[in-house]
Amino acid sequence: MRIDILTLFPDMFTGPFNESIIKRAREQGIVEIVLHNIRNYSDDKHRRVDDYPFGGGAGMVMQIVPVAKLIEQLKKERSYDDIIYLSPDGERFNQQIANRLSLSNNLILLCGHYKGVDQRIRDHYITREISIGDYVLTGGELAAAVIADAVVRVIPGVISDETSALSDSFQDNLLAPPVYTRPAEYNGWRVPDVLLSGHQKKIDEWREQQAMERTKRLRPDLLESGE
């Protein structure tokens, strides 16, 4: 998979993409993440990429020209499964969307800023708009990092134990069951006996029951959305 990220602040991705699982996936050639500085495509000598909105009003708007030039260049080089704009207007990101996007070959993630990007970019280039929550960030970079992380980790081969990703919270619209590790007792607090029994069928049944009970208690909306 290749993910092209269009941003005004490429240095914001240095930490998230150069550590842990994403770093290993890039080193193994499972995923290629390419950062593009939108300012490099500005016609302005000061590399300006924003301007006042037509019709007046507060705030600035990302100009159409540098974004369009960059997208057009990338589309000449390869075809893209989706060109995604990170926006609070978009559909709410969840595990099911991450699973589907992980099947893509090439994705573009456009990070918005200011009051947003010129609507013509959204009308003519964007194929999907995604939000990571009902709140506003200073830019789309953090959202892009979240989406890239969630998508990459479910690509086969990224996590050495692939069954681990399949048992994460939100797979099958359930929260994950409680997990424990050694020691089996600490400060009088014991690990449930069933997990120490070695009886795999009973352990699986216990985990399924716990996942259901935890979801009903903490996120009943997940059960409703899965009906």
Image (spheres, rainbow, N blue to C red):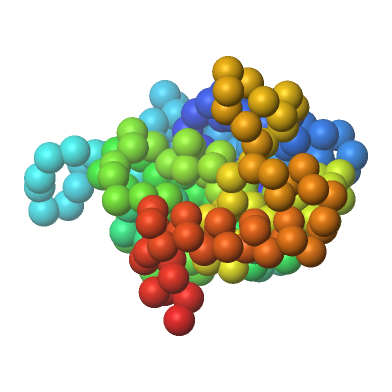
Where 48 falls versus 128 (above or below)?
Answer: above
Tell me the quadrant of the picture where the C terminus can be found: bottom left
Q: Residue at x 59, y 68 (%)?
A: 172
The front one of 83 and 181 is 181
Viewer-side residue, 159 vs 118: 159
The answer to whether residue 141 is above or below residue 109 is: above
For the question of whether residue 107 can be seen, the reply is no
Residue 135 appearing in the image: yes
Q: Position of residue 7 (x, y in %)?
A: 51, 38
Image quarter in which the N terminus is found: bottom right
Please report the residue visible at 39 percent of the width from the left and 31 percent of the height from the top: 48
Could you tell me residue 51's position as x and y percent? 27, 39
Which quadrant of the figure has residue 104? bottom right
Viewer-side residue, 210 vs 81:
210
Q: Which residue lies most toward the top here?
A: 187
**Total marks in image:** 0
Q: Residue at x 41, y 62 (%)?
A: 216
Whole-percent x, y for residue 43 in the image: 46, 38
- Residue 212 place in picture, x, y as percent: 52, 63
* Relative to 227, residue 175 above or below: above
In the picture, measured across the screen, residue 219 lies left or right of residue 115, that is right
User: Image quadrant of residue 160?
Assistant: top right
Identify whether 44 is placed above or below 99. Answer: above
